[in-house]
Amino acid sequence: MAFYCLLVVLQNLMISLCLETSGETHNKKNVLFVISHPDDESIWYGNLRPACAVLRVPLQQLTIVDHPNLQDGFGQVWSHDLLEEIIGEEVTSHDIHTIITFDNYGVSGHCNHRDVHRGVVKFLQTNSERNIKAWQLVSLNIIRKYCGPIDIWLSILSAKRHGSKVIIINEQPLKSYEAMSQHLSQWVWFRKLFVSFSSYTYTNTLQRISP
């Protein structure tokens, strides 16, 4: 079964509220979310399209890449050069100012998540003159990962100790649940439990990527 490397473009997203502690200007900027599987955007923030409808992401701001060298699987190593090329095309096409993706562990340790991170880092390293800023979703330890909304306070405390981190709080966690339910092949009992109790449903910690 074919899976995809996905790039979701949210244009004119006001990111100053979540990034103001890092000194970002209060301007509207184009943000590129680089994810690796059709259900990743539900945990963060044919079945991907109804999920985007739930999340109110216009379909013209969604790019799906179904490439023979970017197939899902723990044994599938994705080319960082290919990812860099695809990311570069999206950045240029949509006048992207900021990229958000996984960190080097990739939340679950999935190799495709980690490859996406490394593809973004490679893009930043070879395009430093473009001054593109990038943020990574911080992976949590097993205890914090499943403590649900309690992690909101733990994340805030952690961010106060580390000035390079910012917190995004999901004000509508039911939207994540509803969006994930659109991925019928993934919507099994343990996935329902994951979305219900996962800290990522309620809050996300972002950290600047230093290539």
Image (tube, grey):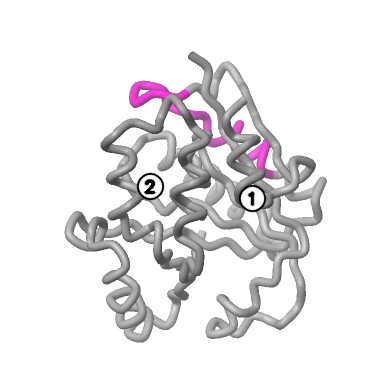
Instruction: Work out whether mark 1 precedes mark 2 in sequence or the reverse, and give the earlier one.
Output: 2
The residue that appears at 80% across and 56% down in the rendered structure is 95
Q: Which portion, as a residue range, is magenta?
A: 72-87
The residue that appears at 46% across and 66% down in the rendered structure is 206
- The image shows residue 70 at horizontal and vertical percentages of 53, 25
Side of 90 relative to 103 (left or right): right
- The image shows residue 155 at horizontal and vertical percentages of 33, 74
Side of 137 relative to 4 (left or right): left
- The image shows residue 87 at horizontal and vertical percentages of 66, 43
Instruction: Place residue 125 in its image quadrant.
Output: bottom right
- SS category of the residue bearing label 1: helix
Q: Amino acid at mark 2?
A: Gly
Q: How many numbered circles does the render carry?
A: 2
Per the image, the residue denoted by label 2 is 106
Mark 1–mark 2 distance (CA, rounded to whole Å)? 22 Å
Instruction: Place residue 204 in its image quadrant.
Output: bottom left
The residue that appears at 38% across and 58% down in the rendered structure is 200
The residue that appears at 66% across and 62% down in the rendered structure is 98
Above or below, 141 relative to 68: below
The residue furthest top is: 1
Per the image, the residue denoted by label 1 is 126
